[in-house]
């Protein structure tokens, strides 16, 4: 097979697997095989760039860097929708439609109004050739490379798919979004490494689509719901679809991600029912929604109704009322986080909002206070958006009291008095007293004991605070010197700010035993957890794992220079400099040495595989029993060194079970049941091409 043929074959095969996975949630191949095929294609395309196909699935992983986005004109303008907020408005809309259609029967399609970024995709001969933002409606940015990273969006539609053939040229429009779960994942990761949090999923999606590096875009799993189809009539003048409903069904058949939440309604009553049904159900969806969109179903009727200057007369958006309440701002509390960032929090007169009592709301940062023009004792509006913490959205100036006080942002840390600093380009003020500022210290301990780090969670819920208050611990290394005598009988009473209730933390023998056992057990936590636990800025879980894979030990990491750090996969200058700075601090090094003396894991398994060959590429293995020529580690290393992958259990994904002496009967039985081939040691050797032993 020529390289060109192989490129064609791999492109088709991977496109098929992608579609299966993202549209039908099934897969014929395991992730490993998929990655191997993708790698093969990537390598071939690099070698023979001319043969790369425009719909190559390698586009999903990004990699293109654009200086700026070219402007593209939309073949059909991207309009906006008129808004309504009440049932009366909706009835008026319905009346206008009825009159416009001279009492002819009509139907509506109701859809949710997704809160993301409007995107327009052009397909030529079934291939995605262009993706653009809305821009001003007439022209937008060509962000094709970024749009190709959306895994649910077909890069090519196979001809003959669906019961309506795919037109030679068409556009689809939809809403690009960052799924809420993905938004939370990214923010959790950013919190771990001390980066400012993304404000909300909508802005995060819009920011991501406009990033210049499509590789970075691909790391955030964007998605897109399609809701419009546009094409010229076919050469005979016949329209491809006659109704919006037909287009939604066909789009789905062609492999597009159409949210199944749409519904056909014949009366405005039914539309109201749809609105009421989704008022609460919409919070279960994977993205934010702020209303519904009502569209006249038949295209000929849409044409008859026509357009105003800005929007169609055949469609309208009904906006759900934001869940807002007004209350007074009594004070501002300044909270200091683990990285020293100071966040202003509005302390409010308690108010009922969407079923819960709200006493606090986020004000984000100093810029936000300025933007809102808010003063102490003002009446403010608070809203619940996509985020969990309510936020102050505006000020009711008509109710500003005579005693309203300007908000003076502190110049010193509210917790330790150190002058605050503002880093260039950042919205937050920071307390630079990293080591001694009490809330920073407390947050550092909380980071250290969390499950994903040292897993000493029996110290949670105020217990760690008690240890800090009593000066029993200054930095996390001190935890390993704690004794039964120091802990037993400790007691403190706290007042819960929310409920006003008091709570007593008391260390009885059982509590102390639990704490000391958890501390002892934490010594077995893997080195990557230890590295993450140290709380080095920008070193999250994943980065810690990559550093361990690369350096293998704390000693190697501590002496690494900038160049070596930059050689670690996915490690850029920001992480490298942060590590260098951290290890250059004598106190930090001393802490590390104490942790070493306490017997924490400072060595990990270097995953850097010395490649021997590729004979096991794409194959998965599991072994059971003992072998004459290998111990466990040697066998595992052999599999990895020859391109194979080790699985943790017998499943359909397993290609070979290597059976040795005293093999586990349950593994063998399961392999038989699933028809997984079993091989012995010498058969495994011959797979390696090793004839010496067989
Ligand atoms: S149809 C001619 N359907 O709302 C109007 N738009 O103000 C075509 N949107 O920028 C739009 N969900 O990004 C339509 N189910 C949906 C939608 C939707 C969200 C957005 C769209 C557009 C804005 C219109």
Image (tube, rainbow, N blue to C red):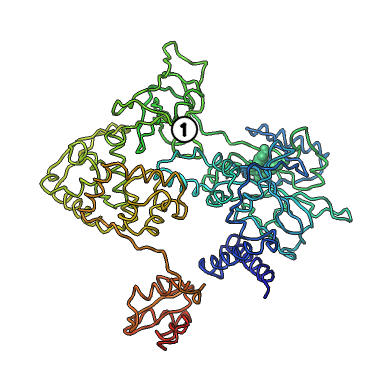
Residue 572 x, y percent position in the rendering? 46, 48
Q: Is residue 329 above or below residue 281?
A: above
Quarter placement of the N terminus:
bottom right
Q: Position of residue 73 (x, y in %)?
A: 75, 42
- 253 above or below 659? above
Residue 214 image position (x, y, % from top left): 59, 49
Tell me if the residue at label 1 has its CB under 8 Å from ligand 1.
Answer: no
Task: Judge whether residue 407 can be spotted in this image.
Answer: yes
Q: Quadrant of residue 252?
A: bottom right
Is residue 98 found left or right of 614 in the rendered image?
Answer: right
Judged from this view, the residue extending furthest toward the left is: 485
Tell me if residue 99 comes above or below residue 449 in the rendering. above
- What element does badge 1 sit on? loop
Give the percent coordinates (x, y) of residue 157: 70, 61
In what quadrant does ligand 1 lie? top right
The part of the image, by quadrant, that contains residue 34 is bottom right
């Amino acid at each position: 097979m020529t390289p060109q043929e192989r490129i064609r074959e791999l492109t088709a095969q991977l496109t098929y697997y992608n579609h299966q996975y993202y549209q039908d949630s099934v897969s014929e191949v395991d992730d490993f095989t998929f990655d191997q095929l993708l790698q093969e294609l990537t390598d071939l395309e690099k070698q023979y760039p001319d043969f790369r196909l425009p719909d190559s699935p390698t586009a999903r992983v990004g990699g293109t860097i654009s200086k700026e986005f070219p402007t593209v004109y939309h073949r059909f303008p991207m309009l906006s929708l008129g808004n309504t907020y009440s049932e009366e408005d909706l009835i008026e809309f319905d009346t206008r439609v009825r009159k416009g259609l001279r009492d002819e029967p009509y139907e509506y399609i109701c859809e949710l109004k997704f809160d993301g970024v409007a995107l327009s995709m052009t397909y030529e001969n079934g291939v995605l050739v262009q993706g653009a933002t809305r821009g001003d409606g007439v022209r937008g940015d060509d962000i094709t490379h970024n749009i190709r990273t959306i895994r649910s969006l077909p890069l090519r539609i196979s001809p003959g798919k669906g019961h309506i053939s795919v037109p030679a040229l068409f556009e689809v429009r939809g809403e690009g979004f960052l799924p809420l779960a993905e938004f939370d994942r990214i923010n959790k990761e950013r919190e771990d490494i001390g980066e400012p949090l993304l404000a909300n999923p909508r802005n995060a999606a819009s920011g991501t689509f406009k990033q210049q590096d499509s590789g970075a875009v691909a790391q955030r799993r964007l998605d897109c719901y399609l809701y419009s189809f546009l094409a010229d009539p076919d050469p005979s003048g016949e329209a491809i679809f006659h109704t919006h409903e037909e287009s939604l069904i066909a789009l789905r058949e062609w492999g597009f991600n159409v949210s199944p939440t749409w519904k056909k309604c014949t009366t405005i009553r039914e539309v109201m029912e749809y609105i009421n049904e989704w008022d609460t159900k919409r919070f279960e969806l994977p993205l934010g929604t702020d209303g519904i969109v009502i569209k006249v179903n038949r295209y000929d009727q849409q044409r008859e109704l026509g357009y105003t200057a800005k929007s169609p007369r055949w469609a309208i958006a009904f906006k759900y009322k934001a869940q807002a309440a007004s209350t007074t701002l009594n004070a501002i509390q300044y909270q200091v986080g683990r990285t020293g960032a100071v966040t202003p929090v509005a302390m409010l007169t308690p108010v009922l909002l969407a079923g819960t009592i709200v006493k606090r709301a986020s004000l984000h940062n100093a810029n936000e206070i300025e933007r809102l023009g808010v003063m102490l004792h003002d009446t403010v509006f608070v809203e619940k958006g996509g985020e969990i913490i309510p936020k102050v959205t505006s000020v009711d100036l008509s109710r500003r009291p005579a005693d309203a006080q300007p908000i003076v942002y502190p110049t010193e840390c509210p917790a330790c008095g150190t002058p605050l600093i503002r880093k260039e380009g950042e919205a937050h003020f920071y307390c630079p007293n990293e080591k001694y500022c009490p809330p920073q210290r407390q947050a550092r301990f909380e980071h250290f004991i969390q499950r994903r780090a040292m897993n000493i969670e029996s110290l949670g819920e105020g217990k760690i605070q008690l240890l800090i208050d009593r000066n029993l611990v200054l930095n996390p290394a001190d935890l390993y010197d704690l004794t039964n005598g120091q802990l037993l009988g400790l007691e403190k009473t706290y007042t819960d700010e929310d409920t006003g209730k008091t709570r007593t933390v008391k260390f009885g023998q059982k509590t102390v035993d639990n704490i000391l056992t958890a501390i002892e057990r934490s010594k077995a936590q893997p080195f990557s957890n230890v590295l993450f636990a140290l709380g080095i800025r920008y070193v999250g879980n994943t980065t810690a794992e990559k550093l361990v894979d690369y350096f293998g030990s704390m000693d190697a990491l501590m002496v690494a220079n900038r160049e070596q750090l930059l050689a670690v996969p996915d490690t850029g200058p920001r992480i490298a400099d942060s590590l260098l700075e951290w290890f250059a601090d004598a106190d930090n090094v001393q802490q590390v040495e104490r942790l070493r003396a306490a017997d924490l894991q400072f060595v990990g398994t270097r995953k850097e595989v010395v490649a021997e060959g590729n004979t096991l590429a794409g194959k998965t293995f599991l072994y059971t029993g003992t072998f004459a020529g290998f111990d466990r580690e040697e066998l595992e290393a052999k599999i990895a060194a020859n391109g194979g992958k080790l699985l943790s259990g017998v499943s359909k994904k397993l290609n070979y079970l290597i059976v040795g002496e005293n093999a586990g009967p349950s593994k063998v039985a399961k392999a038989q049941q699933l028809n997984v081939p079993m091989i012995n040691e010498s058969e495994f050797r011959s797979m390696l091409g090793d004839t010496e032993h067989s």
